[in-house]
Image: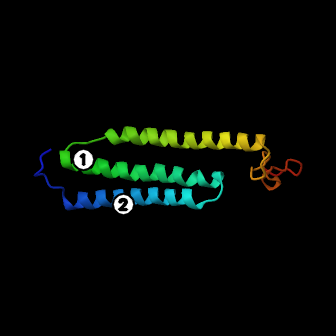
């Protein structure tokens, strides 16, 4: 890759749009982390912002370096795979730990362990 290489206009626009979209999603996740009140509300916004935001930034990076080096650059797929795999798992583990802690200490803001009665299947009347 030489410093004289110029990126075509279409690639620059696509890369800029994807990076801007990814940064915007990450910003929205950060604002959600700051603005929401409880831990259970706060944990979702950064998780979604991270996953979607990093995905857009990685795709933009793939487009940029693929066009610049005139060969497919797919290193970012590995990063995207691990981010997509680990972020939701981390969310579930954090929420389960918080639920256990809050139920153990008897806090009121914890959701009930039983589902609401409106979502239960009424087997006596034959409804599915």
Please, what secondary structure does the residue beneath circle 1 have? helix
Q: Quadrant of residue 25?
A: bottom left
Question: Which residue in the rendered view is the most extreme toward the left?
Answer: 4
- Residue placed under numbered mark 2 in the picture: 20
Picture coordinates of residue 102 (x, y %)? 73, 44
- Closest to the observer, 100 or 118: 100
* Residue name at image x 37 percent, y 41 percent: 77
Mark 1 or mark 2, whichever is nearer to me: 2
Residue 89 numbered tag: none
In three-dimensional space, the C-alpha distance between marks 1 and 2, rounded to whole angstroms, equals: 17 Å
Please, what secondary structure does the residue beneath circle 2 have? helix
Picture coordinates of residue 63 (x, y %)? 28, 50
- Residue placed under numbered mark 1 in the picture: 65
Instruction: Assign the N terminus to one quadrant of the image.
Output: top left
Q: Residue 49 vs residue 115: left or right?
A: left
Q: Quadrant of residue 22?
A: bottom left
Question: Which residue in the rendered view is the most extreme toward the right?
Answer: 124
């Amino acid at each position: 890759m030489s410093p004289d290489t110029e990126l075509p206009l279409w690639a620059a626009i696509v890369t800029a749009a994807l990076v801007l979209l990814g940064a915007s999603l990450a910003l929205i996740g950060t604002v959600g982390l700051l603005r929401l009140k409880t831990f259970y509300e706060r944990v979702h916004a950064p998780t979604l912002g991270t996953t979607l935001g990093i995905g857009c930034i990685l795709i933009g990076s793939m487009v940029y370096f693929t066009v610049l080096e005139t060969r497919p650059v797919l290193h970012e797929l590995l990063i995207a795979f691990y981010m997509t795999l680990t972020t939701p798992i981390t969310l579930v583990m954090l929420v389960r730990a918080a639920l256990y802690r809050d139920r153990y200490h008897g806090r009121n803001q914890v959701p009930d362990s039983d589902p609401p009665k409106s979502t239960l299947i009424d087997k006596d009347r034959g409804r599915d």
